[in-house]
Structures are given as structure tokens and as C-alpha cells.
Image: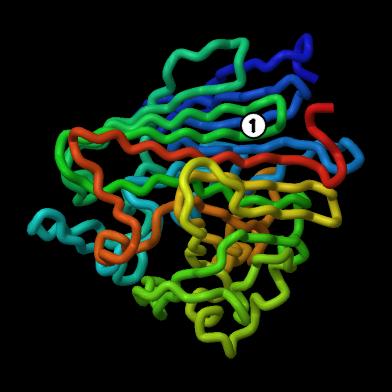
Amino acid sequence: MAANGKRHCSVAPFGRLPDGRQVDQYSLVNAHGNEITLITYGATVVSIIVPDRTGTNADISLGFDNLAGYLQQGNPFFGSTIGRYGNRIARGKFTLNGVEYTLAINNGVNHLHGGPGGFDKVLWSAQPIDADDAQVTMTYLSPDGEEGYPGTLNVAVRFLFTDNNELEIDYKATTDAVTIVNLTNHTYFNLNGTGTVLDHLLQINAPRFTPIDETSIPLGEISSVAGTSFDFTRPKRIGEHIDRVEDIQIKNGCGYDHNFVFSAGEGLRTIANVVSEQSGRTLEVATTEPGVQFYSGNFLDGSLQGKGGVTYVKRSGFCLETQHFPDSPNRPAFPATVLKPDETYTSQTVFRFGVAGWDAAQ
């Protein structure tokens, strides 16, 4: 339990980068003693410790015990802040104001999650914190031309852990030249704490999705989920249709790795719910974004050893990456991701953790 039942934040060293710079770990503890930890490398969520139906705490996020794990080749963005552009851009090219820009290629023929030197692989600064509150703001100044993007981008991401067991993530960015921005968080969740997530019940309040080609780039159309493997408008086990290889979309994504499209609306609204009948833990996701990438951990293959020596096998975690759509800079029909110097990019996502039939505020 947190001291005196109050929220608090503490900081400790987490390790040093090869160039000697220190990486810090911030622990956000709410009034119930539940805890989320983050590190300044990649503005990364390292752990989420919340109770199950018996009140037993466990870490429900995938990641590593030490900095070396996050620095290793093959780290699949565990918990990281993603930018400048979450998801894929076809062949690493886009045109803005008549100028073609070429980005770093790091996913077959495409650009993924900001490139090989994206925001997940840089050291963020942490602003001074109030030790009596469970929040921290991390900032990063991305120079003009980084990974091929135009403009100097000033980014701030605030992480707040409330007494309702909500992780609020608020994104803000400004630029000195026209650019594109699409920020998200890449936490892998497992509400059981161990095993696979195939038995988790998932509901996504999205009537449509964006079909992809064999390189995971959207085809440009927005299709109805009705009658398909992608219909999660009512709760369905993640594993129910995940191996339906006769479905070309399941085949192209090697499972689920697709953008779901919400009905028109503004402001923060609930877009997904997940329940583990085994542990009783629940996850509710709300966002201001128009889409979410549901990724079912298809490319985890047992080669990575995570926290506590656990081997992360295929589908041992899932992601709900709130976002604008993949390849939007090349798709005029998709919601725009352009940011101008006289504008401020803002986005908010809230992950609320609970237990079925139990109120965290009790």
C-alpha cells in the first residue's frame, strides 16, 4: 500500500547507455498501492502492477528487467512511445507541399514506427515532478531531418496514474516547419500475467477496418467488419478466428495486425474493452484518436527472454495502439496527420485497469 494511502512518484537509476548517459526509472504509485513504472529510454512503460479478482498483484505488461533488454536488437517496441509516425508508411516515402520526403526503411520495403532510430530508441528528458503525485512528463526535441522527417518537433508526453487505476497518456507536439505526426504507445498487455492472450475476451467498438496488402500497408479502402474475422463489435475471444488462414486479411497480418476505424466523433470516448475470465482483470481503452491498431503478438517467437526470465512465445501479449491510420500521408481519404508551425498536436489515451465486478475506487 502506498504510504498514507496517497499517490506518489519516485525516481531511481535504471542503467547507462553505451555513451554513458543515464537512464532513469520513474515509479508511479496510486492510493491503492498499485504501480506503473516507466523509463526515460523510449519514454517506455516497463511494468503495470494491478490486482486480479483475489486481490493478488501481478505485472500485466511485457518487457525486460534491465536496460540491456531494451537495447537489444529485436526488442519489438515493448512499452515504448512511438514517433514520429506510429505504424507504417509505404516504401518510406510521402509528399508534403509538393516536396517528396524519403524516410528510413526498417520493415521490409516500408517505414515502421518512426524508423530504426525512432522515438522508442532515444533518451527522453523528464521534467521535475511532484513527489506527492503519480505522474511524470517526458520531453524530446526531434531535430529537423531525423529519420528523414522535416521540421524540428518538440514533443511532450505526460503519464498520470490515477486512483481509479487509470493510466492517462497525454501527447503534445509543436513544429517549426510543416511535418507529419502520429504518436502512440506500444505496450503489450497480458491480463493473466503469463501464458498467451488467446482466451482474452476483446470488444472493439469499430464498425470498420482498413484491409492491408501482404506488406501490411492499407489497400486504401475502409471495409465493414460485419461477417468477417474482424468483427469485435461484441466480445469475442482473441483466438477464435486468429488462425483462419483462408481469410486473406488474417493471412496478410499473420493474425491480427490491423487498424480499426471508429464512427465519427470527437473527444475522449471508450473504444475497446478486454476481459480475462481467468484472472478477472479488465482493460478499458478510451482515446481521442480515430483508429486503433490491434496487434495480437504474431511475431513474438520465443527468442526473447523477458521479465523474471519468462520466454515470450507467440501471442503472449496484445497491443491496442491508438492512432491515426497507417500510411495516411499517402492516402488523402484518411484523416490527415499534417502538423503546421501555428498548430499544436494533441492526443489523449486512457487505459483503465479493473476487475470484473469490482470497483477500483472501493
| Disc 1 target residue | 36
Crowd rating for badge 1 (residues with CA inside 10 Å; few <14, some 14–19, many 20+): many
Which residue is located at x 75 percent, y 60 percent?
200
Position of residue 24 measured from the top left corner of the image (x, y, whole percent) = 49, 25
* Up-down relation of residue 85 to residue 65 (above or below): below
Q: Could you tell whether 86 is left or right of 50 in the image? A: left
What residue is rendered at 44% in x and 70% in y?
Answer: 210
Q: Is residue 356 above or below residue 55?
A: below
Say which element carries label 1: strand
In x, y percent, where is residue 283? 70, 47
Q: How many marks?
A: 1
Foreground pick, 350 / 115: 350
Residue ranking furthest to the left:
98
Quadrant into which the N terminus falls: top right
Q: Tag 1: residue type?
A: Ile
Please, which colouring scheme is shown?
A: rainbow
Q: Position of residue 99 (x, y in %)?
A: 8, 57
| 179 displayed left or right of 256 | left
Is residue 72 visible in this depiction of the protein? no
Whether residue 49 is situated above or below residue 333 in the rendered picture = above
Coordinates of residue 353 in the picture (x, y in percent)? 71, 40
Residue under the point 20% across and 63% down: 93
Seen in the image, is 242 located left or right of residue 157?
right
Residue furthest to the front in view is 265
